[in-house]
Amino acid sequence: MNAPSLPPEETMYTALLEKNSAFEGIFIVGVKTTGIFCRPTCTARKPKRENVEFFANTQDALAVGYRPCKVCRPMERCGDEPPWLKNLLREISRDPSRRWKDADLRERNIDPARIRRWFKQHHGITFQAYLRALRINRAFGQIRHTGNVTDTAFGAGFESLSGFNDAFKSLAGFAPSHSKQGAIVTINRILTPLGPMLAGATEEGICLLEFSDRRMLETQIKRLRKYLSASFLPGESPHFTPLQEQLDAYFRGHLQEFDLPLVTPATPFQKSVWDVLRQIPYGHTRTYKDQAIAIGNVKAVRAVASANGDNRISIIIPCHRVIGKDGSLVGYGGGLWRKQYLLDLEQKHR
């Protein structure tokens, strides 16, 4: 998708030097001395200013003869699983109860150290910790529906009931026998042209969708954990497939309204602000004052801005459609250039 506008070149060059992931999807950089093009976050040596030029997308870079970088792989979606990992992840999805040893990985020509680094970088935990969390999350769902702790424990690959109980309580924060009263938010990565996002879902619907590099992400998770009295574990949710499909359609310009169940615990004031946000038409913008008027309190401009900042479900609850009274871009947790991209995208397909 062509982004109709690019940031100033000095801004892009600074983002390149800083490996700023908030510019992922905003621009591509071509290096004249090597003939390759890279992402803003490429870890290769940074070229001099006079040796680079900037493009809105990979197609434009290819059209003038640049080749994709083998380090940052700009032709792939940012955060996508590398080819050497895809088959293993499919096996894990089919049978989360299986225990994987280093020898099993080497049989598939996968370096255990390499997979540990990848999971630490993209999930913040080791490969084995990820597998344990998957097993516990799946066990939680089974116990909620069957009530049988013993069968679930051994079906999840644990060798003893006590070991299962200890692992479950450590990760979920409550004993397996309390699963019907407890709560877990399932989290997973959702890939977008602007970089990966972290999605969270309860059984009822989507409760979290934030760019994974947002500074407030940990704070938002802490607030949700308190609101929902829930633990956060990686896993699969039936809500994630339609979420990915609808986001893909949105970024292609084929979808203007999302149809997904949302879970938005908040104060009554925050809920009123978020409800009004969802009433802003696709391709339009409003000011914070407009939003305050819409909720019936013209003096609440600052409070409205604060509530916008507390929105935990980006894009779907479109806080990016709110701008300053002078038309300037202000206050977007995912980064102002992402906000500009979204507004340009919607204006183009309005």
Image (spheres, rainbow, N blue to C red):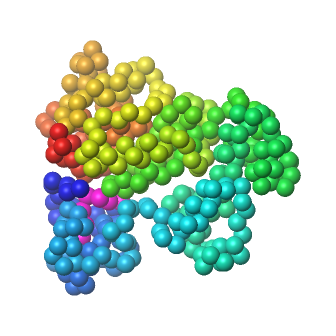
Residue 316 visible to the viewer: yes
- Is residue 108 rendered to the left or right of residue 302? right
- Is residue 188 rendered to the left or right of residue 298? right
Q: Quadrant of the N terminus?
A: bottom left
Residue under the image location 58 percent in, 31 percent down: 228
Q: Quadrant of the C terminus?
A: top left
Where is residue 162? Give x, y as percent: 86, 48
- Is residue 270 rendered to the left or right of residue 336? right
Q: Which residues are magenta?
A: 21-29
Residue farthest to the top?
296
Residue 130 visible to the viewer: no
Q: Nearer the viewer, residue 58 or 221?
A: 58
Residue under the image location 23 percent in, 35 percent down: 282
Residue farthest to the left?
326
- Is residue 11 rendered to the left or right of residue 88? left
- Magenta span contains residue 194: no
Where is residue 103? Give x, y as percent: 71, 76
Where is residue 109? Give x, y as percent: 60, 79
Q: Is residue 131 above or below residue 114?
A: above
Residue farthest to the front?
94
Where is residue 104? Give x, y as percent: 69, 73
Asked where in the image residue 229 lies, by quadrant, the reply is: top right
- Magenta span contains residue 26: yes
Residue under the image location 52 percent in, 49 percent down: 188
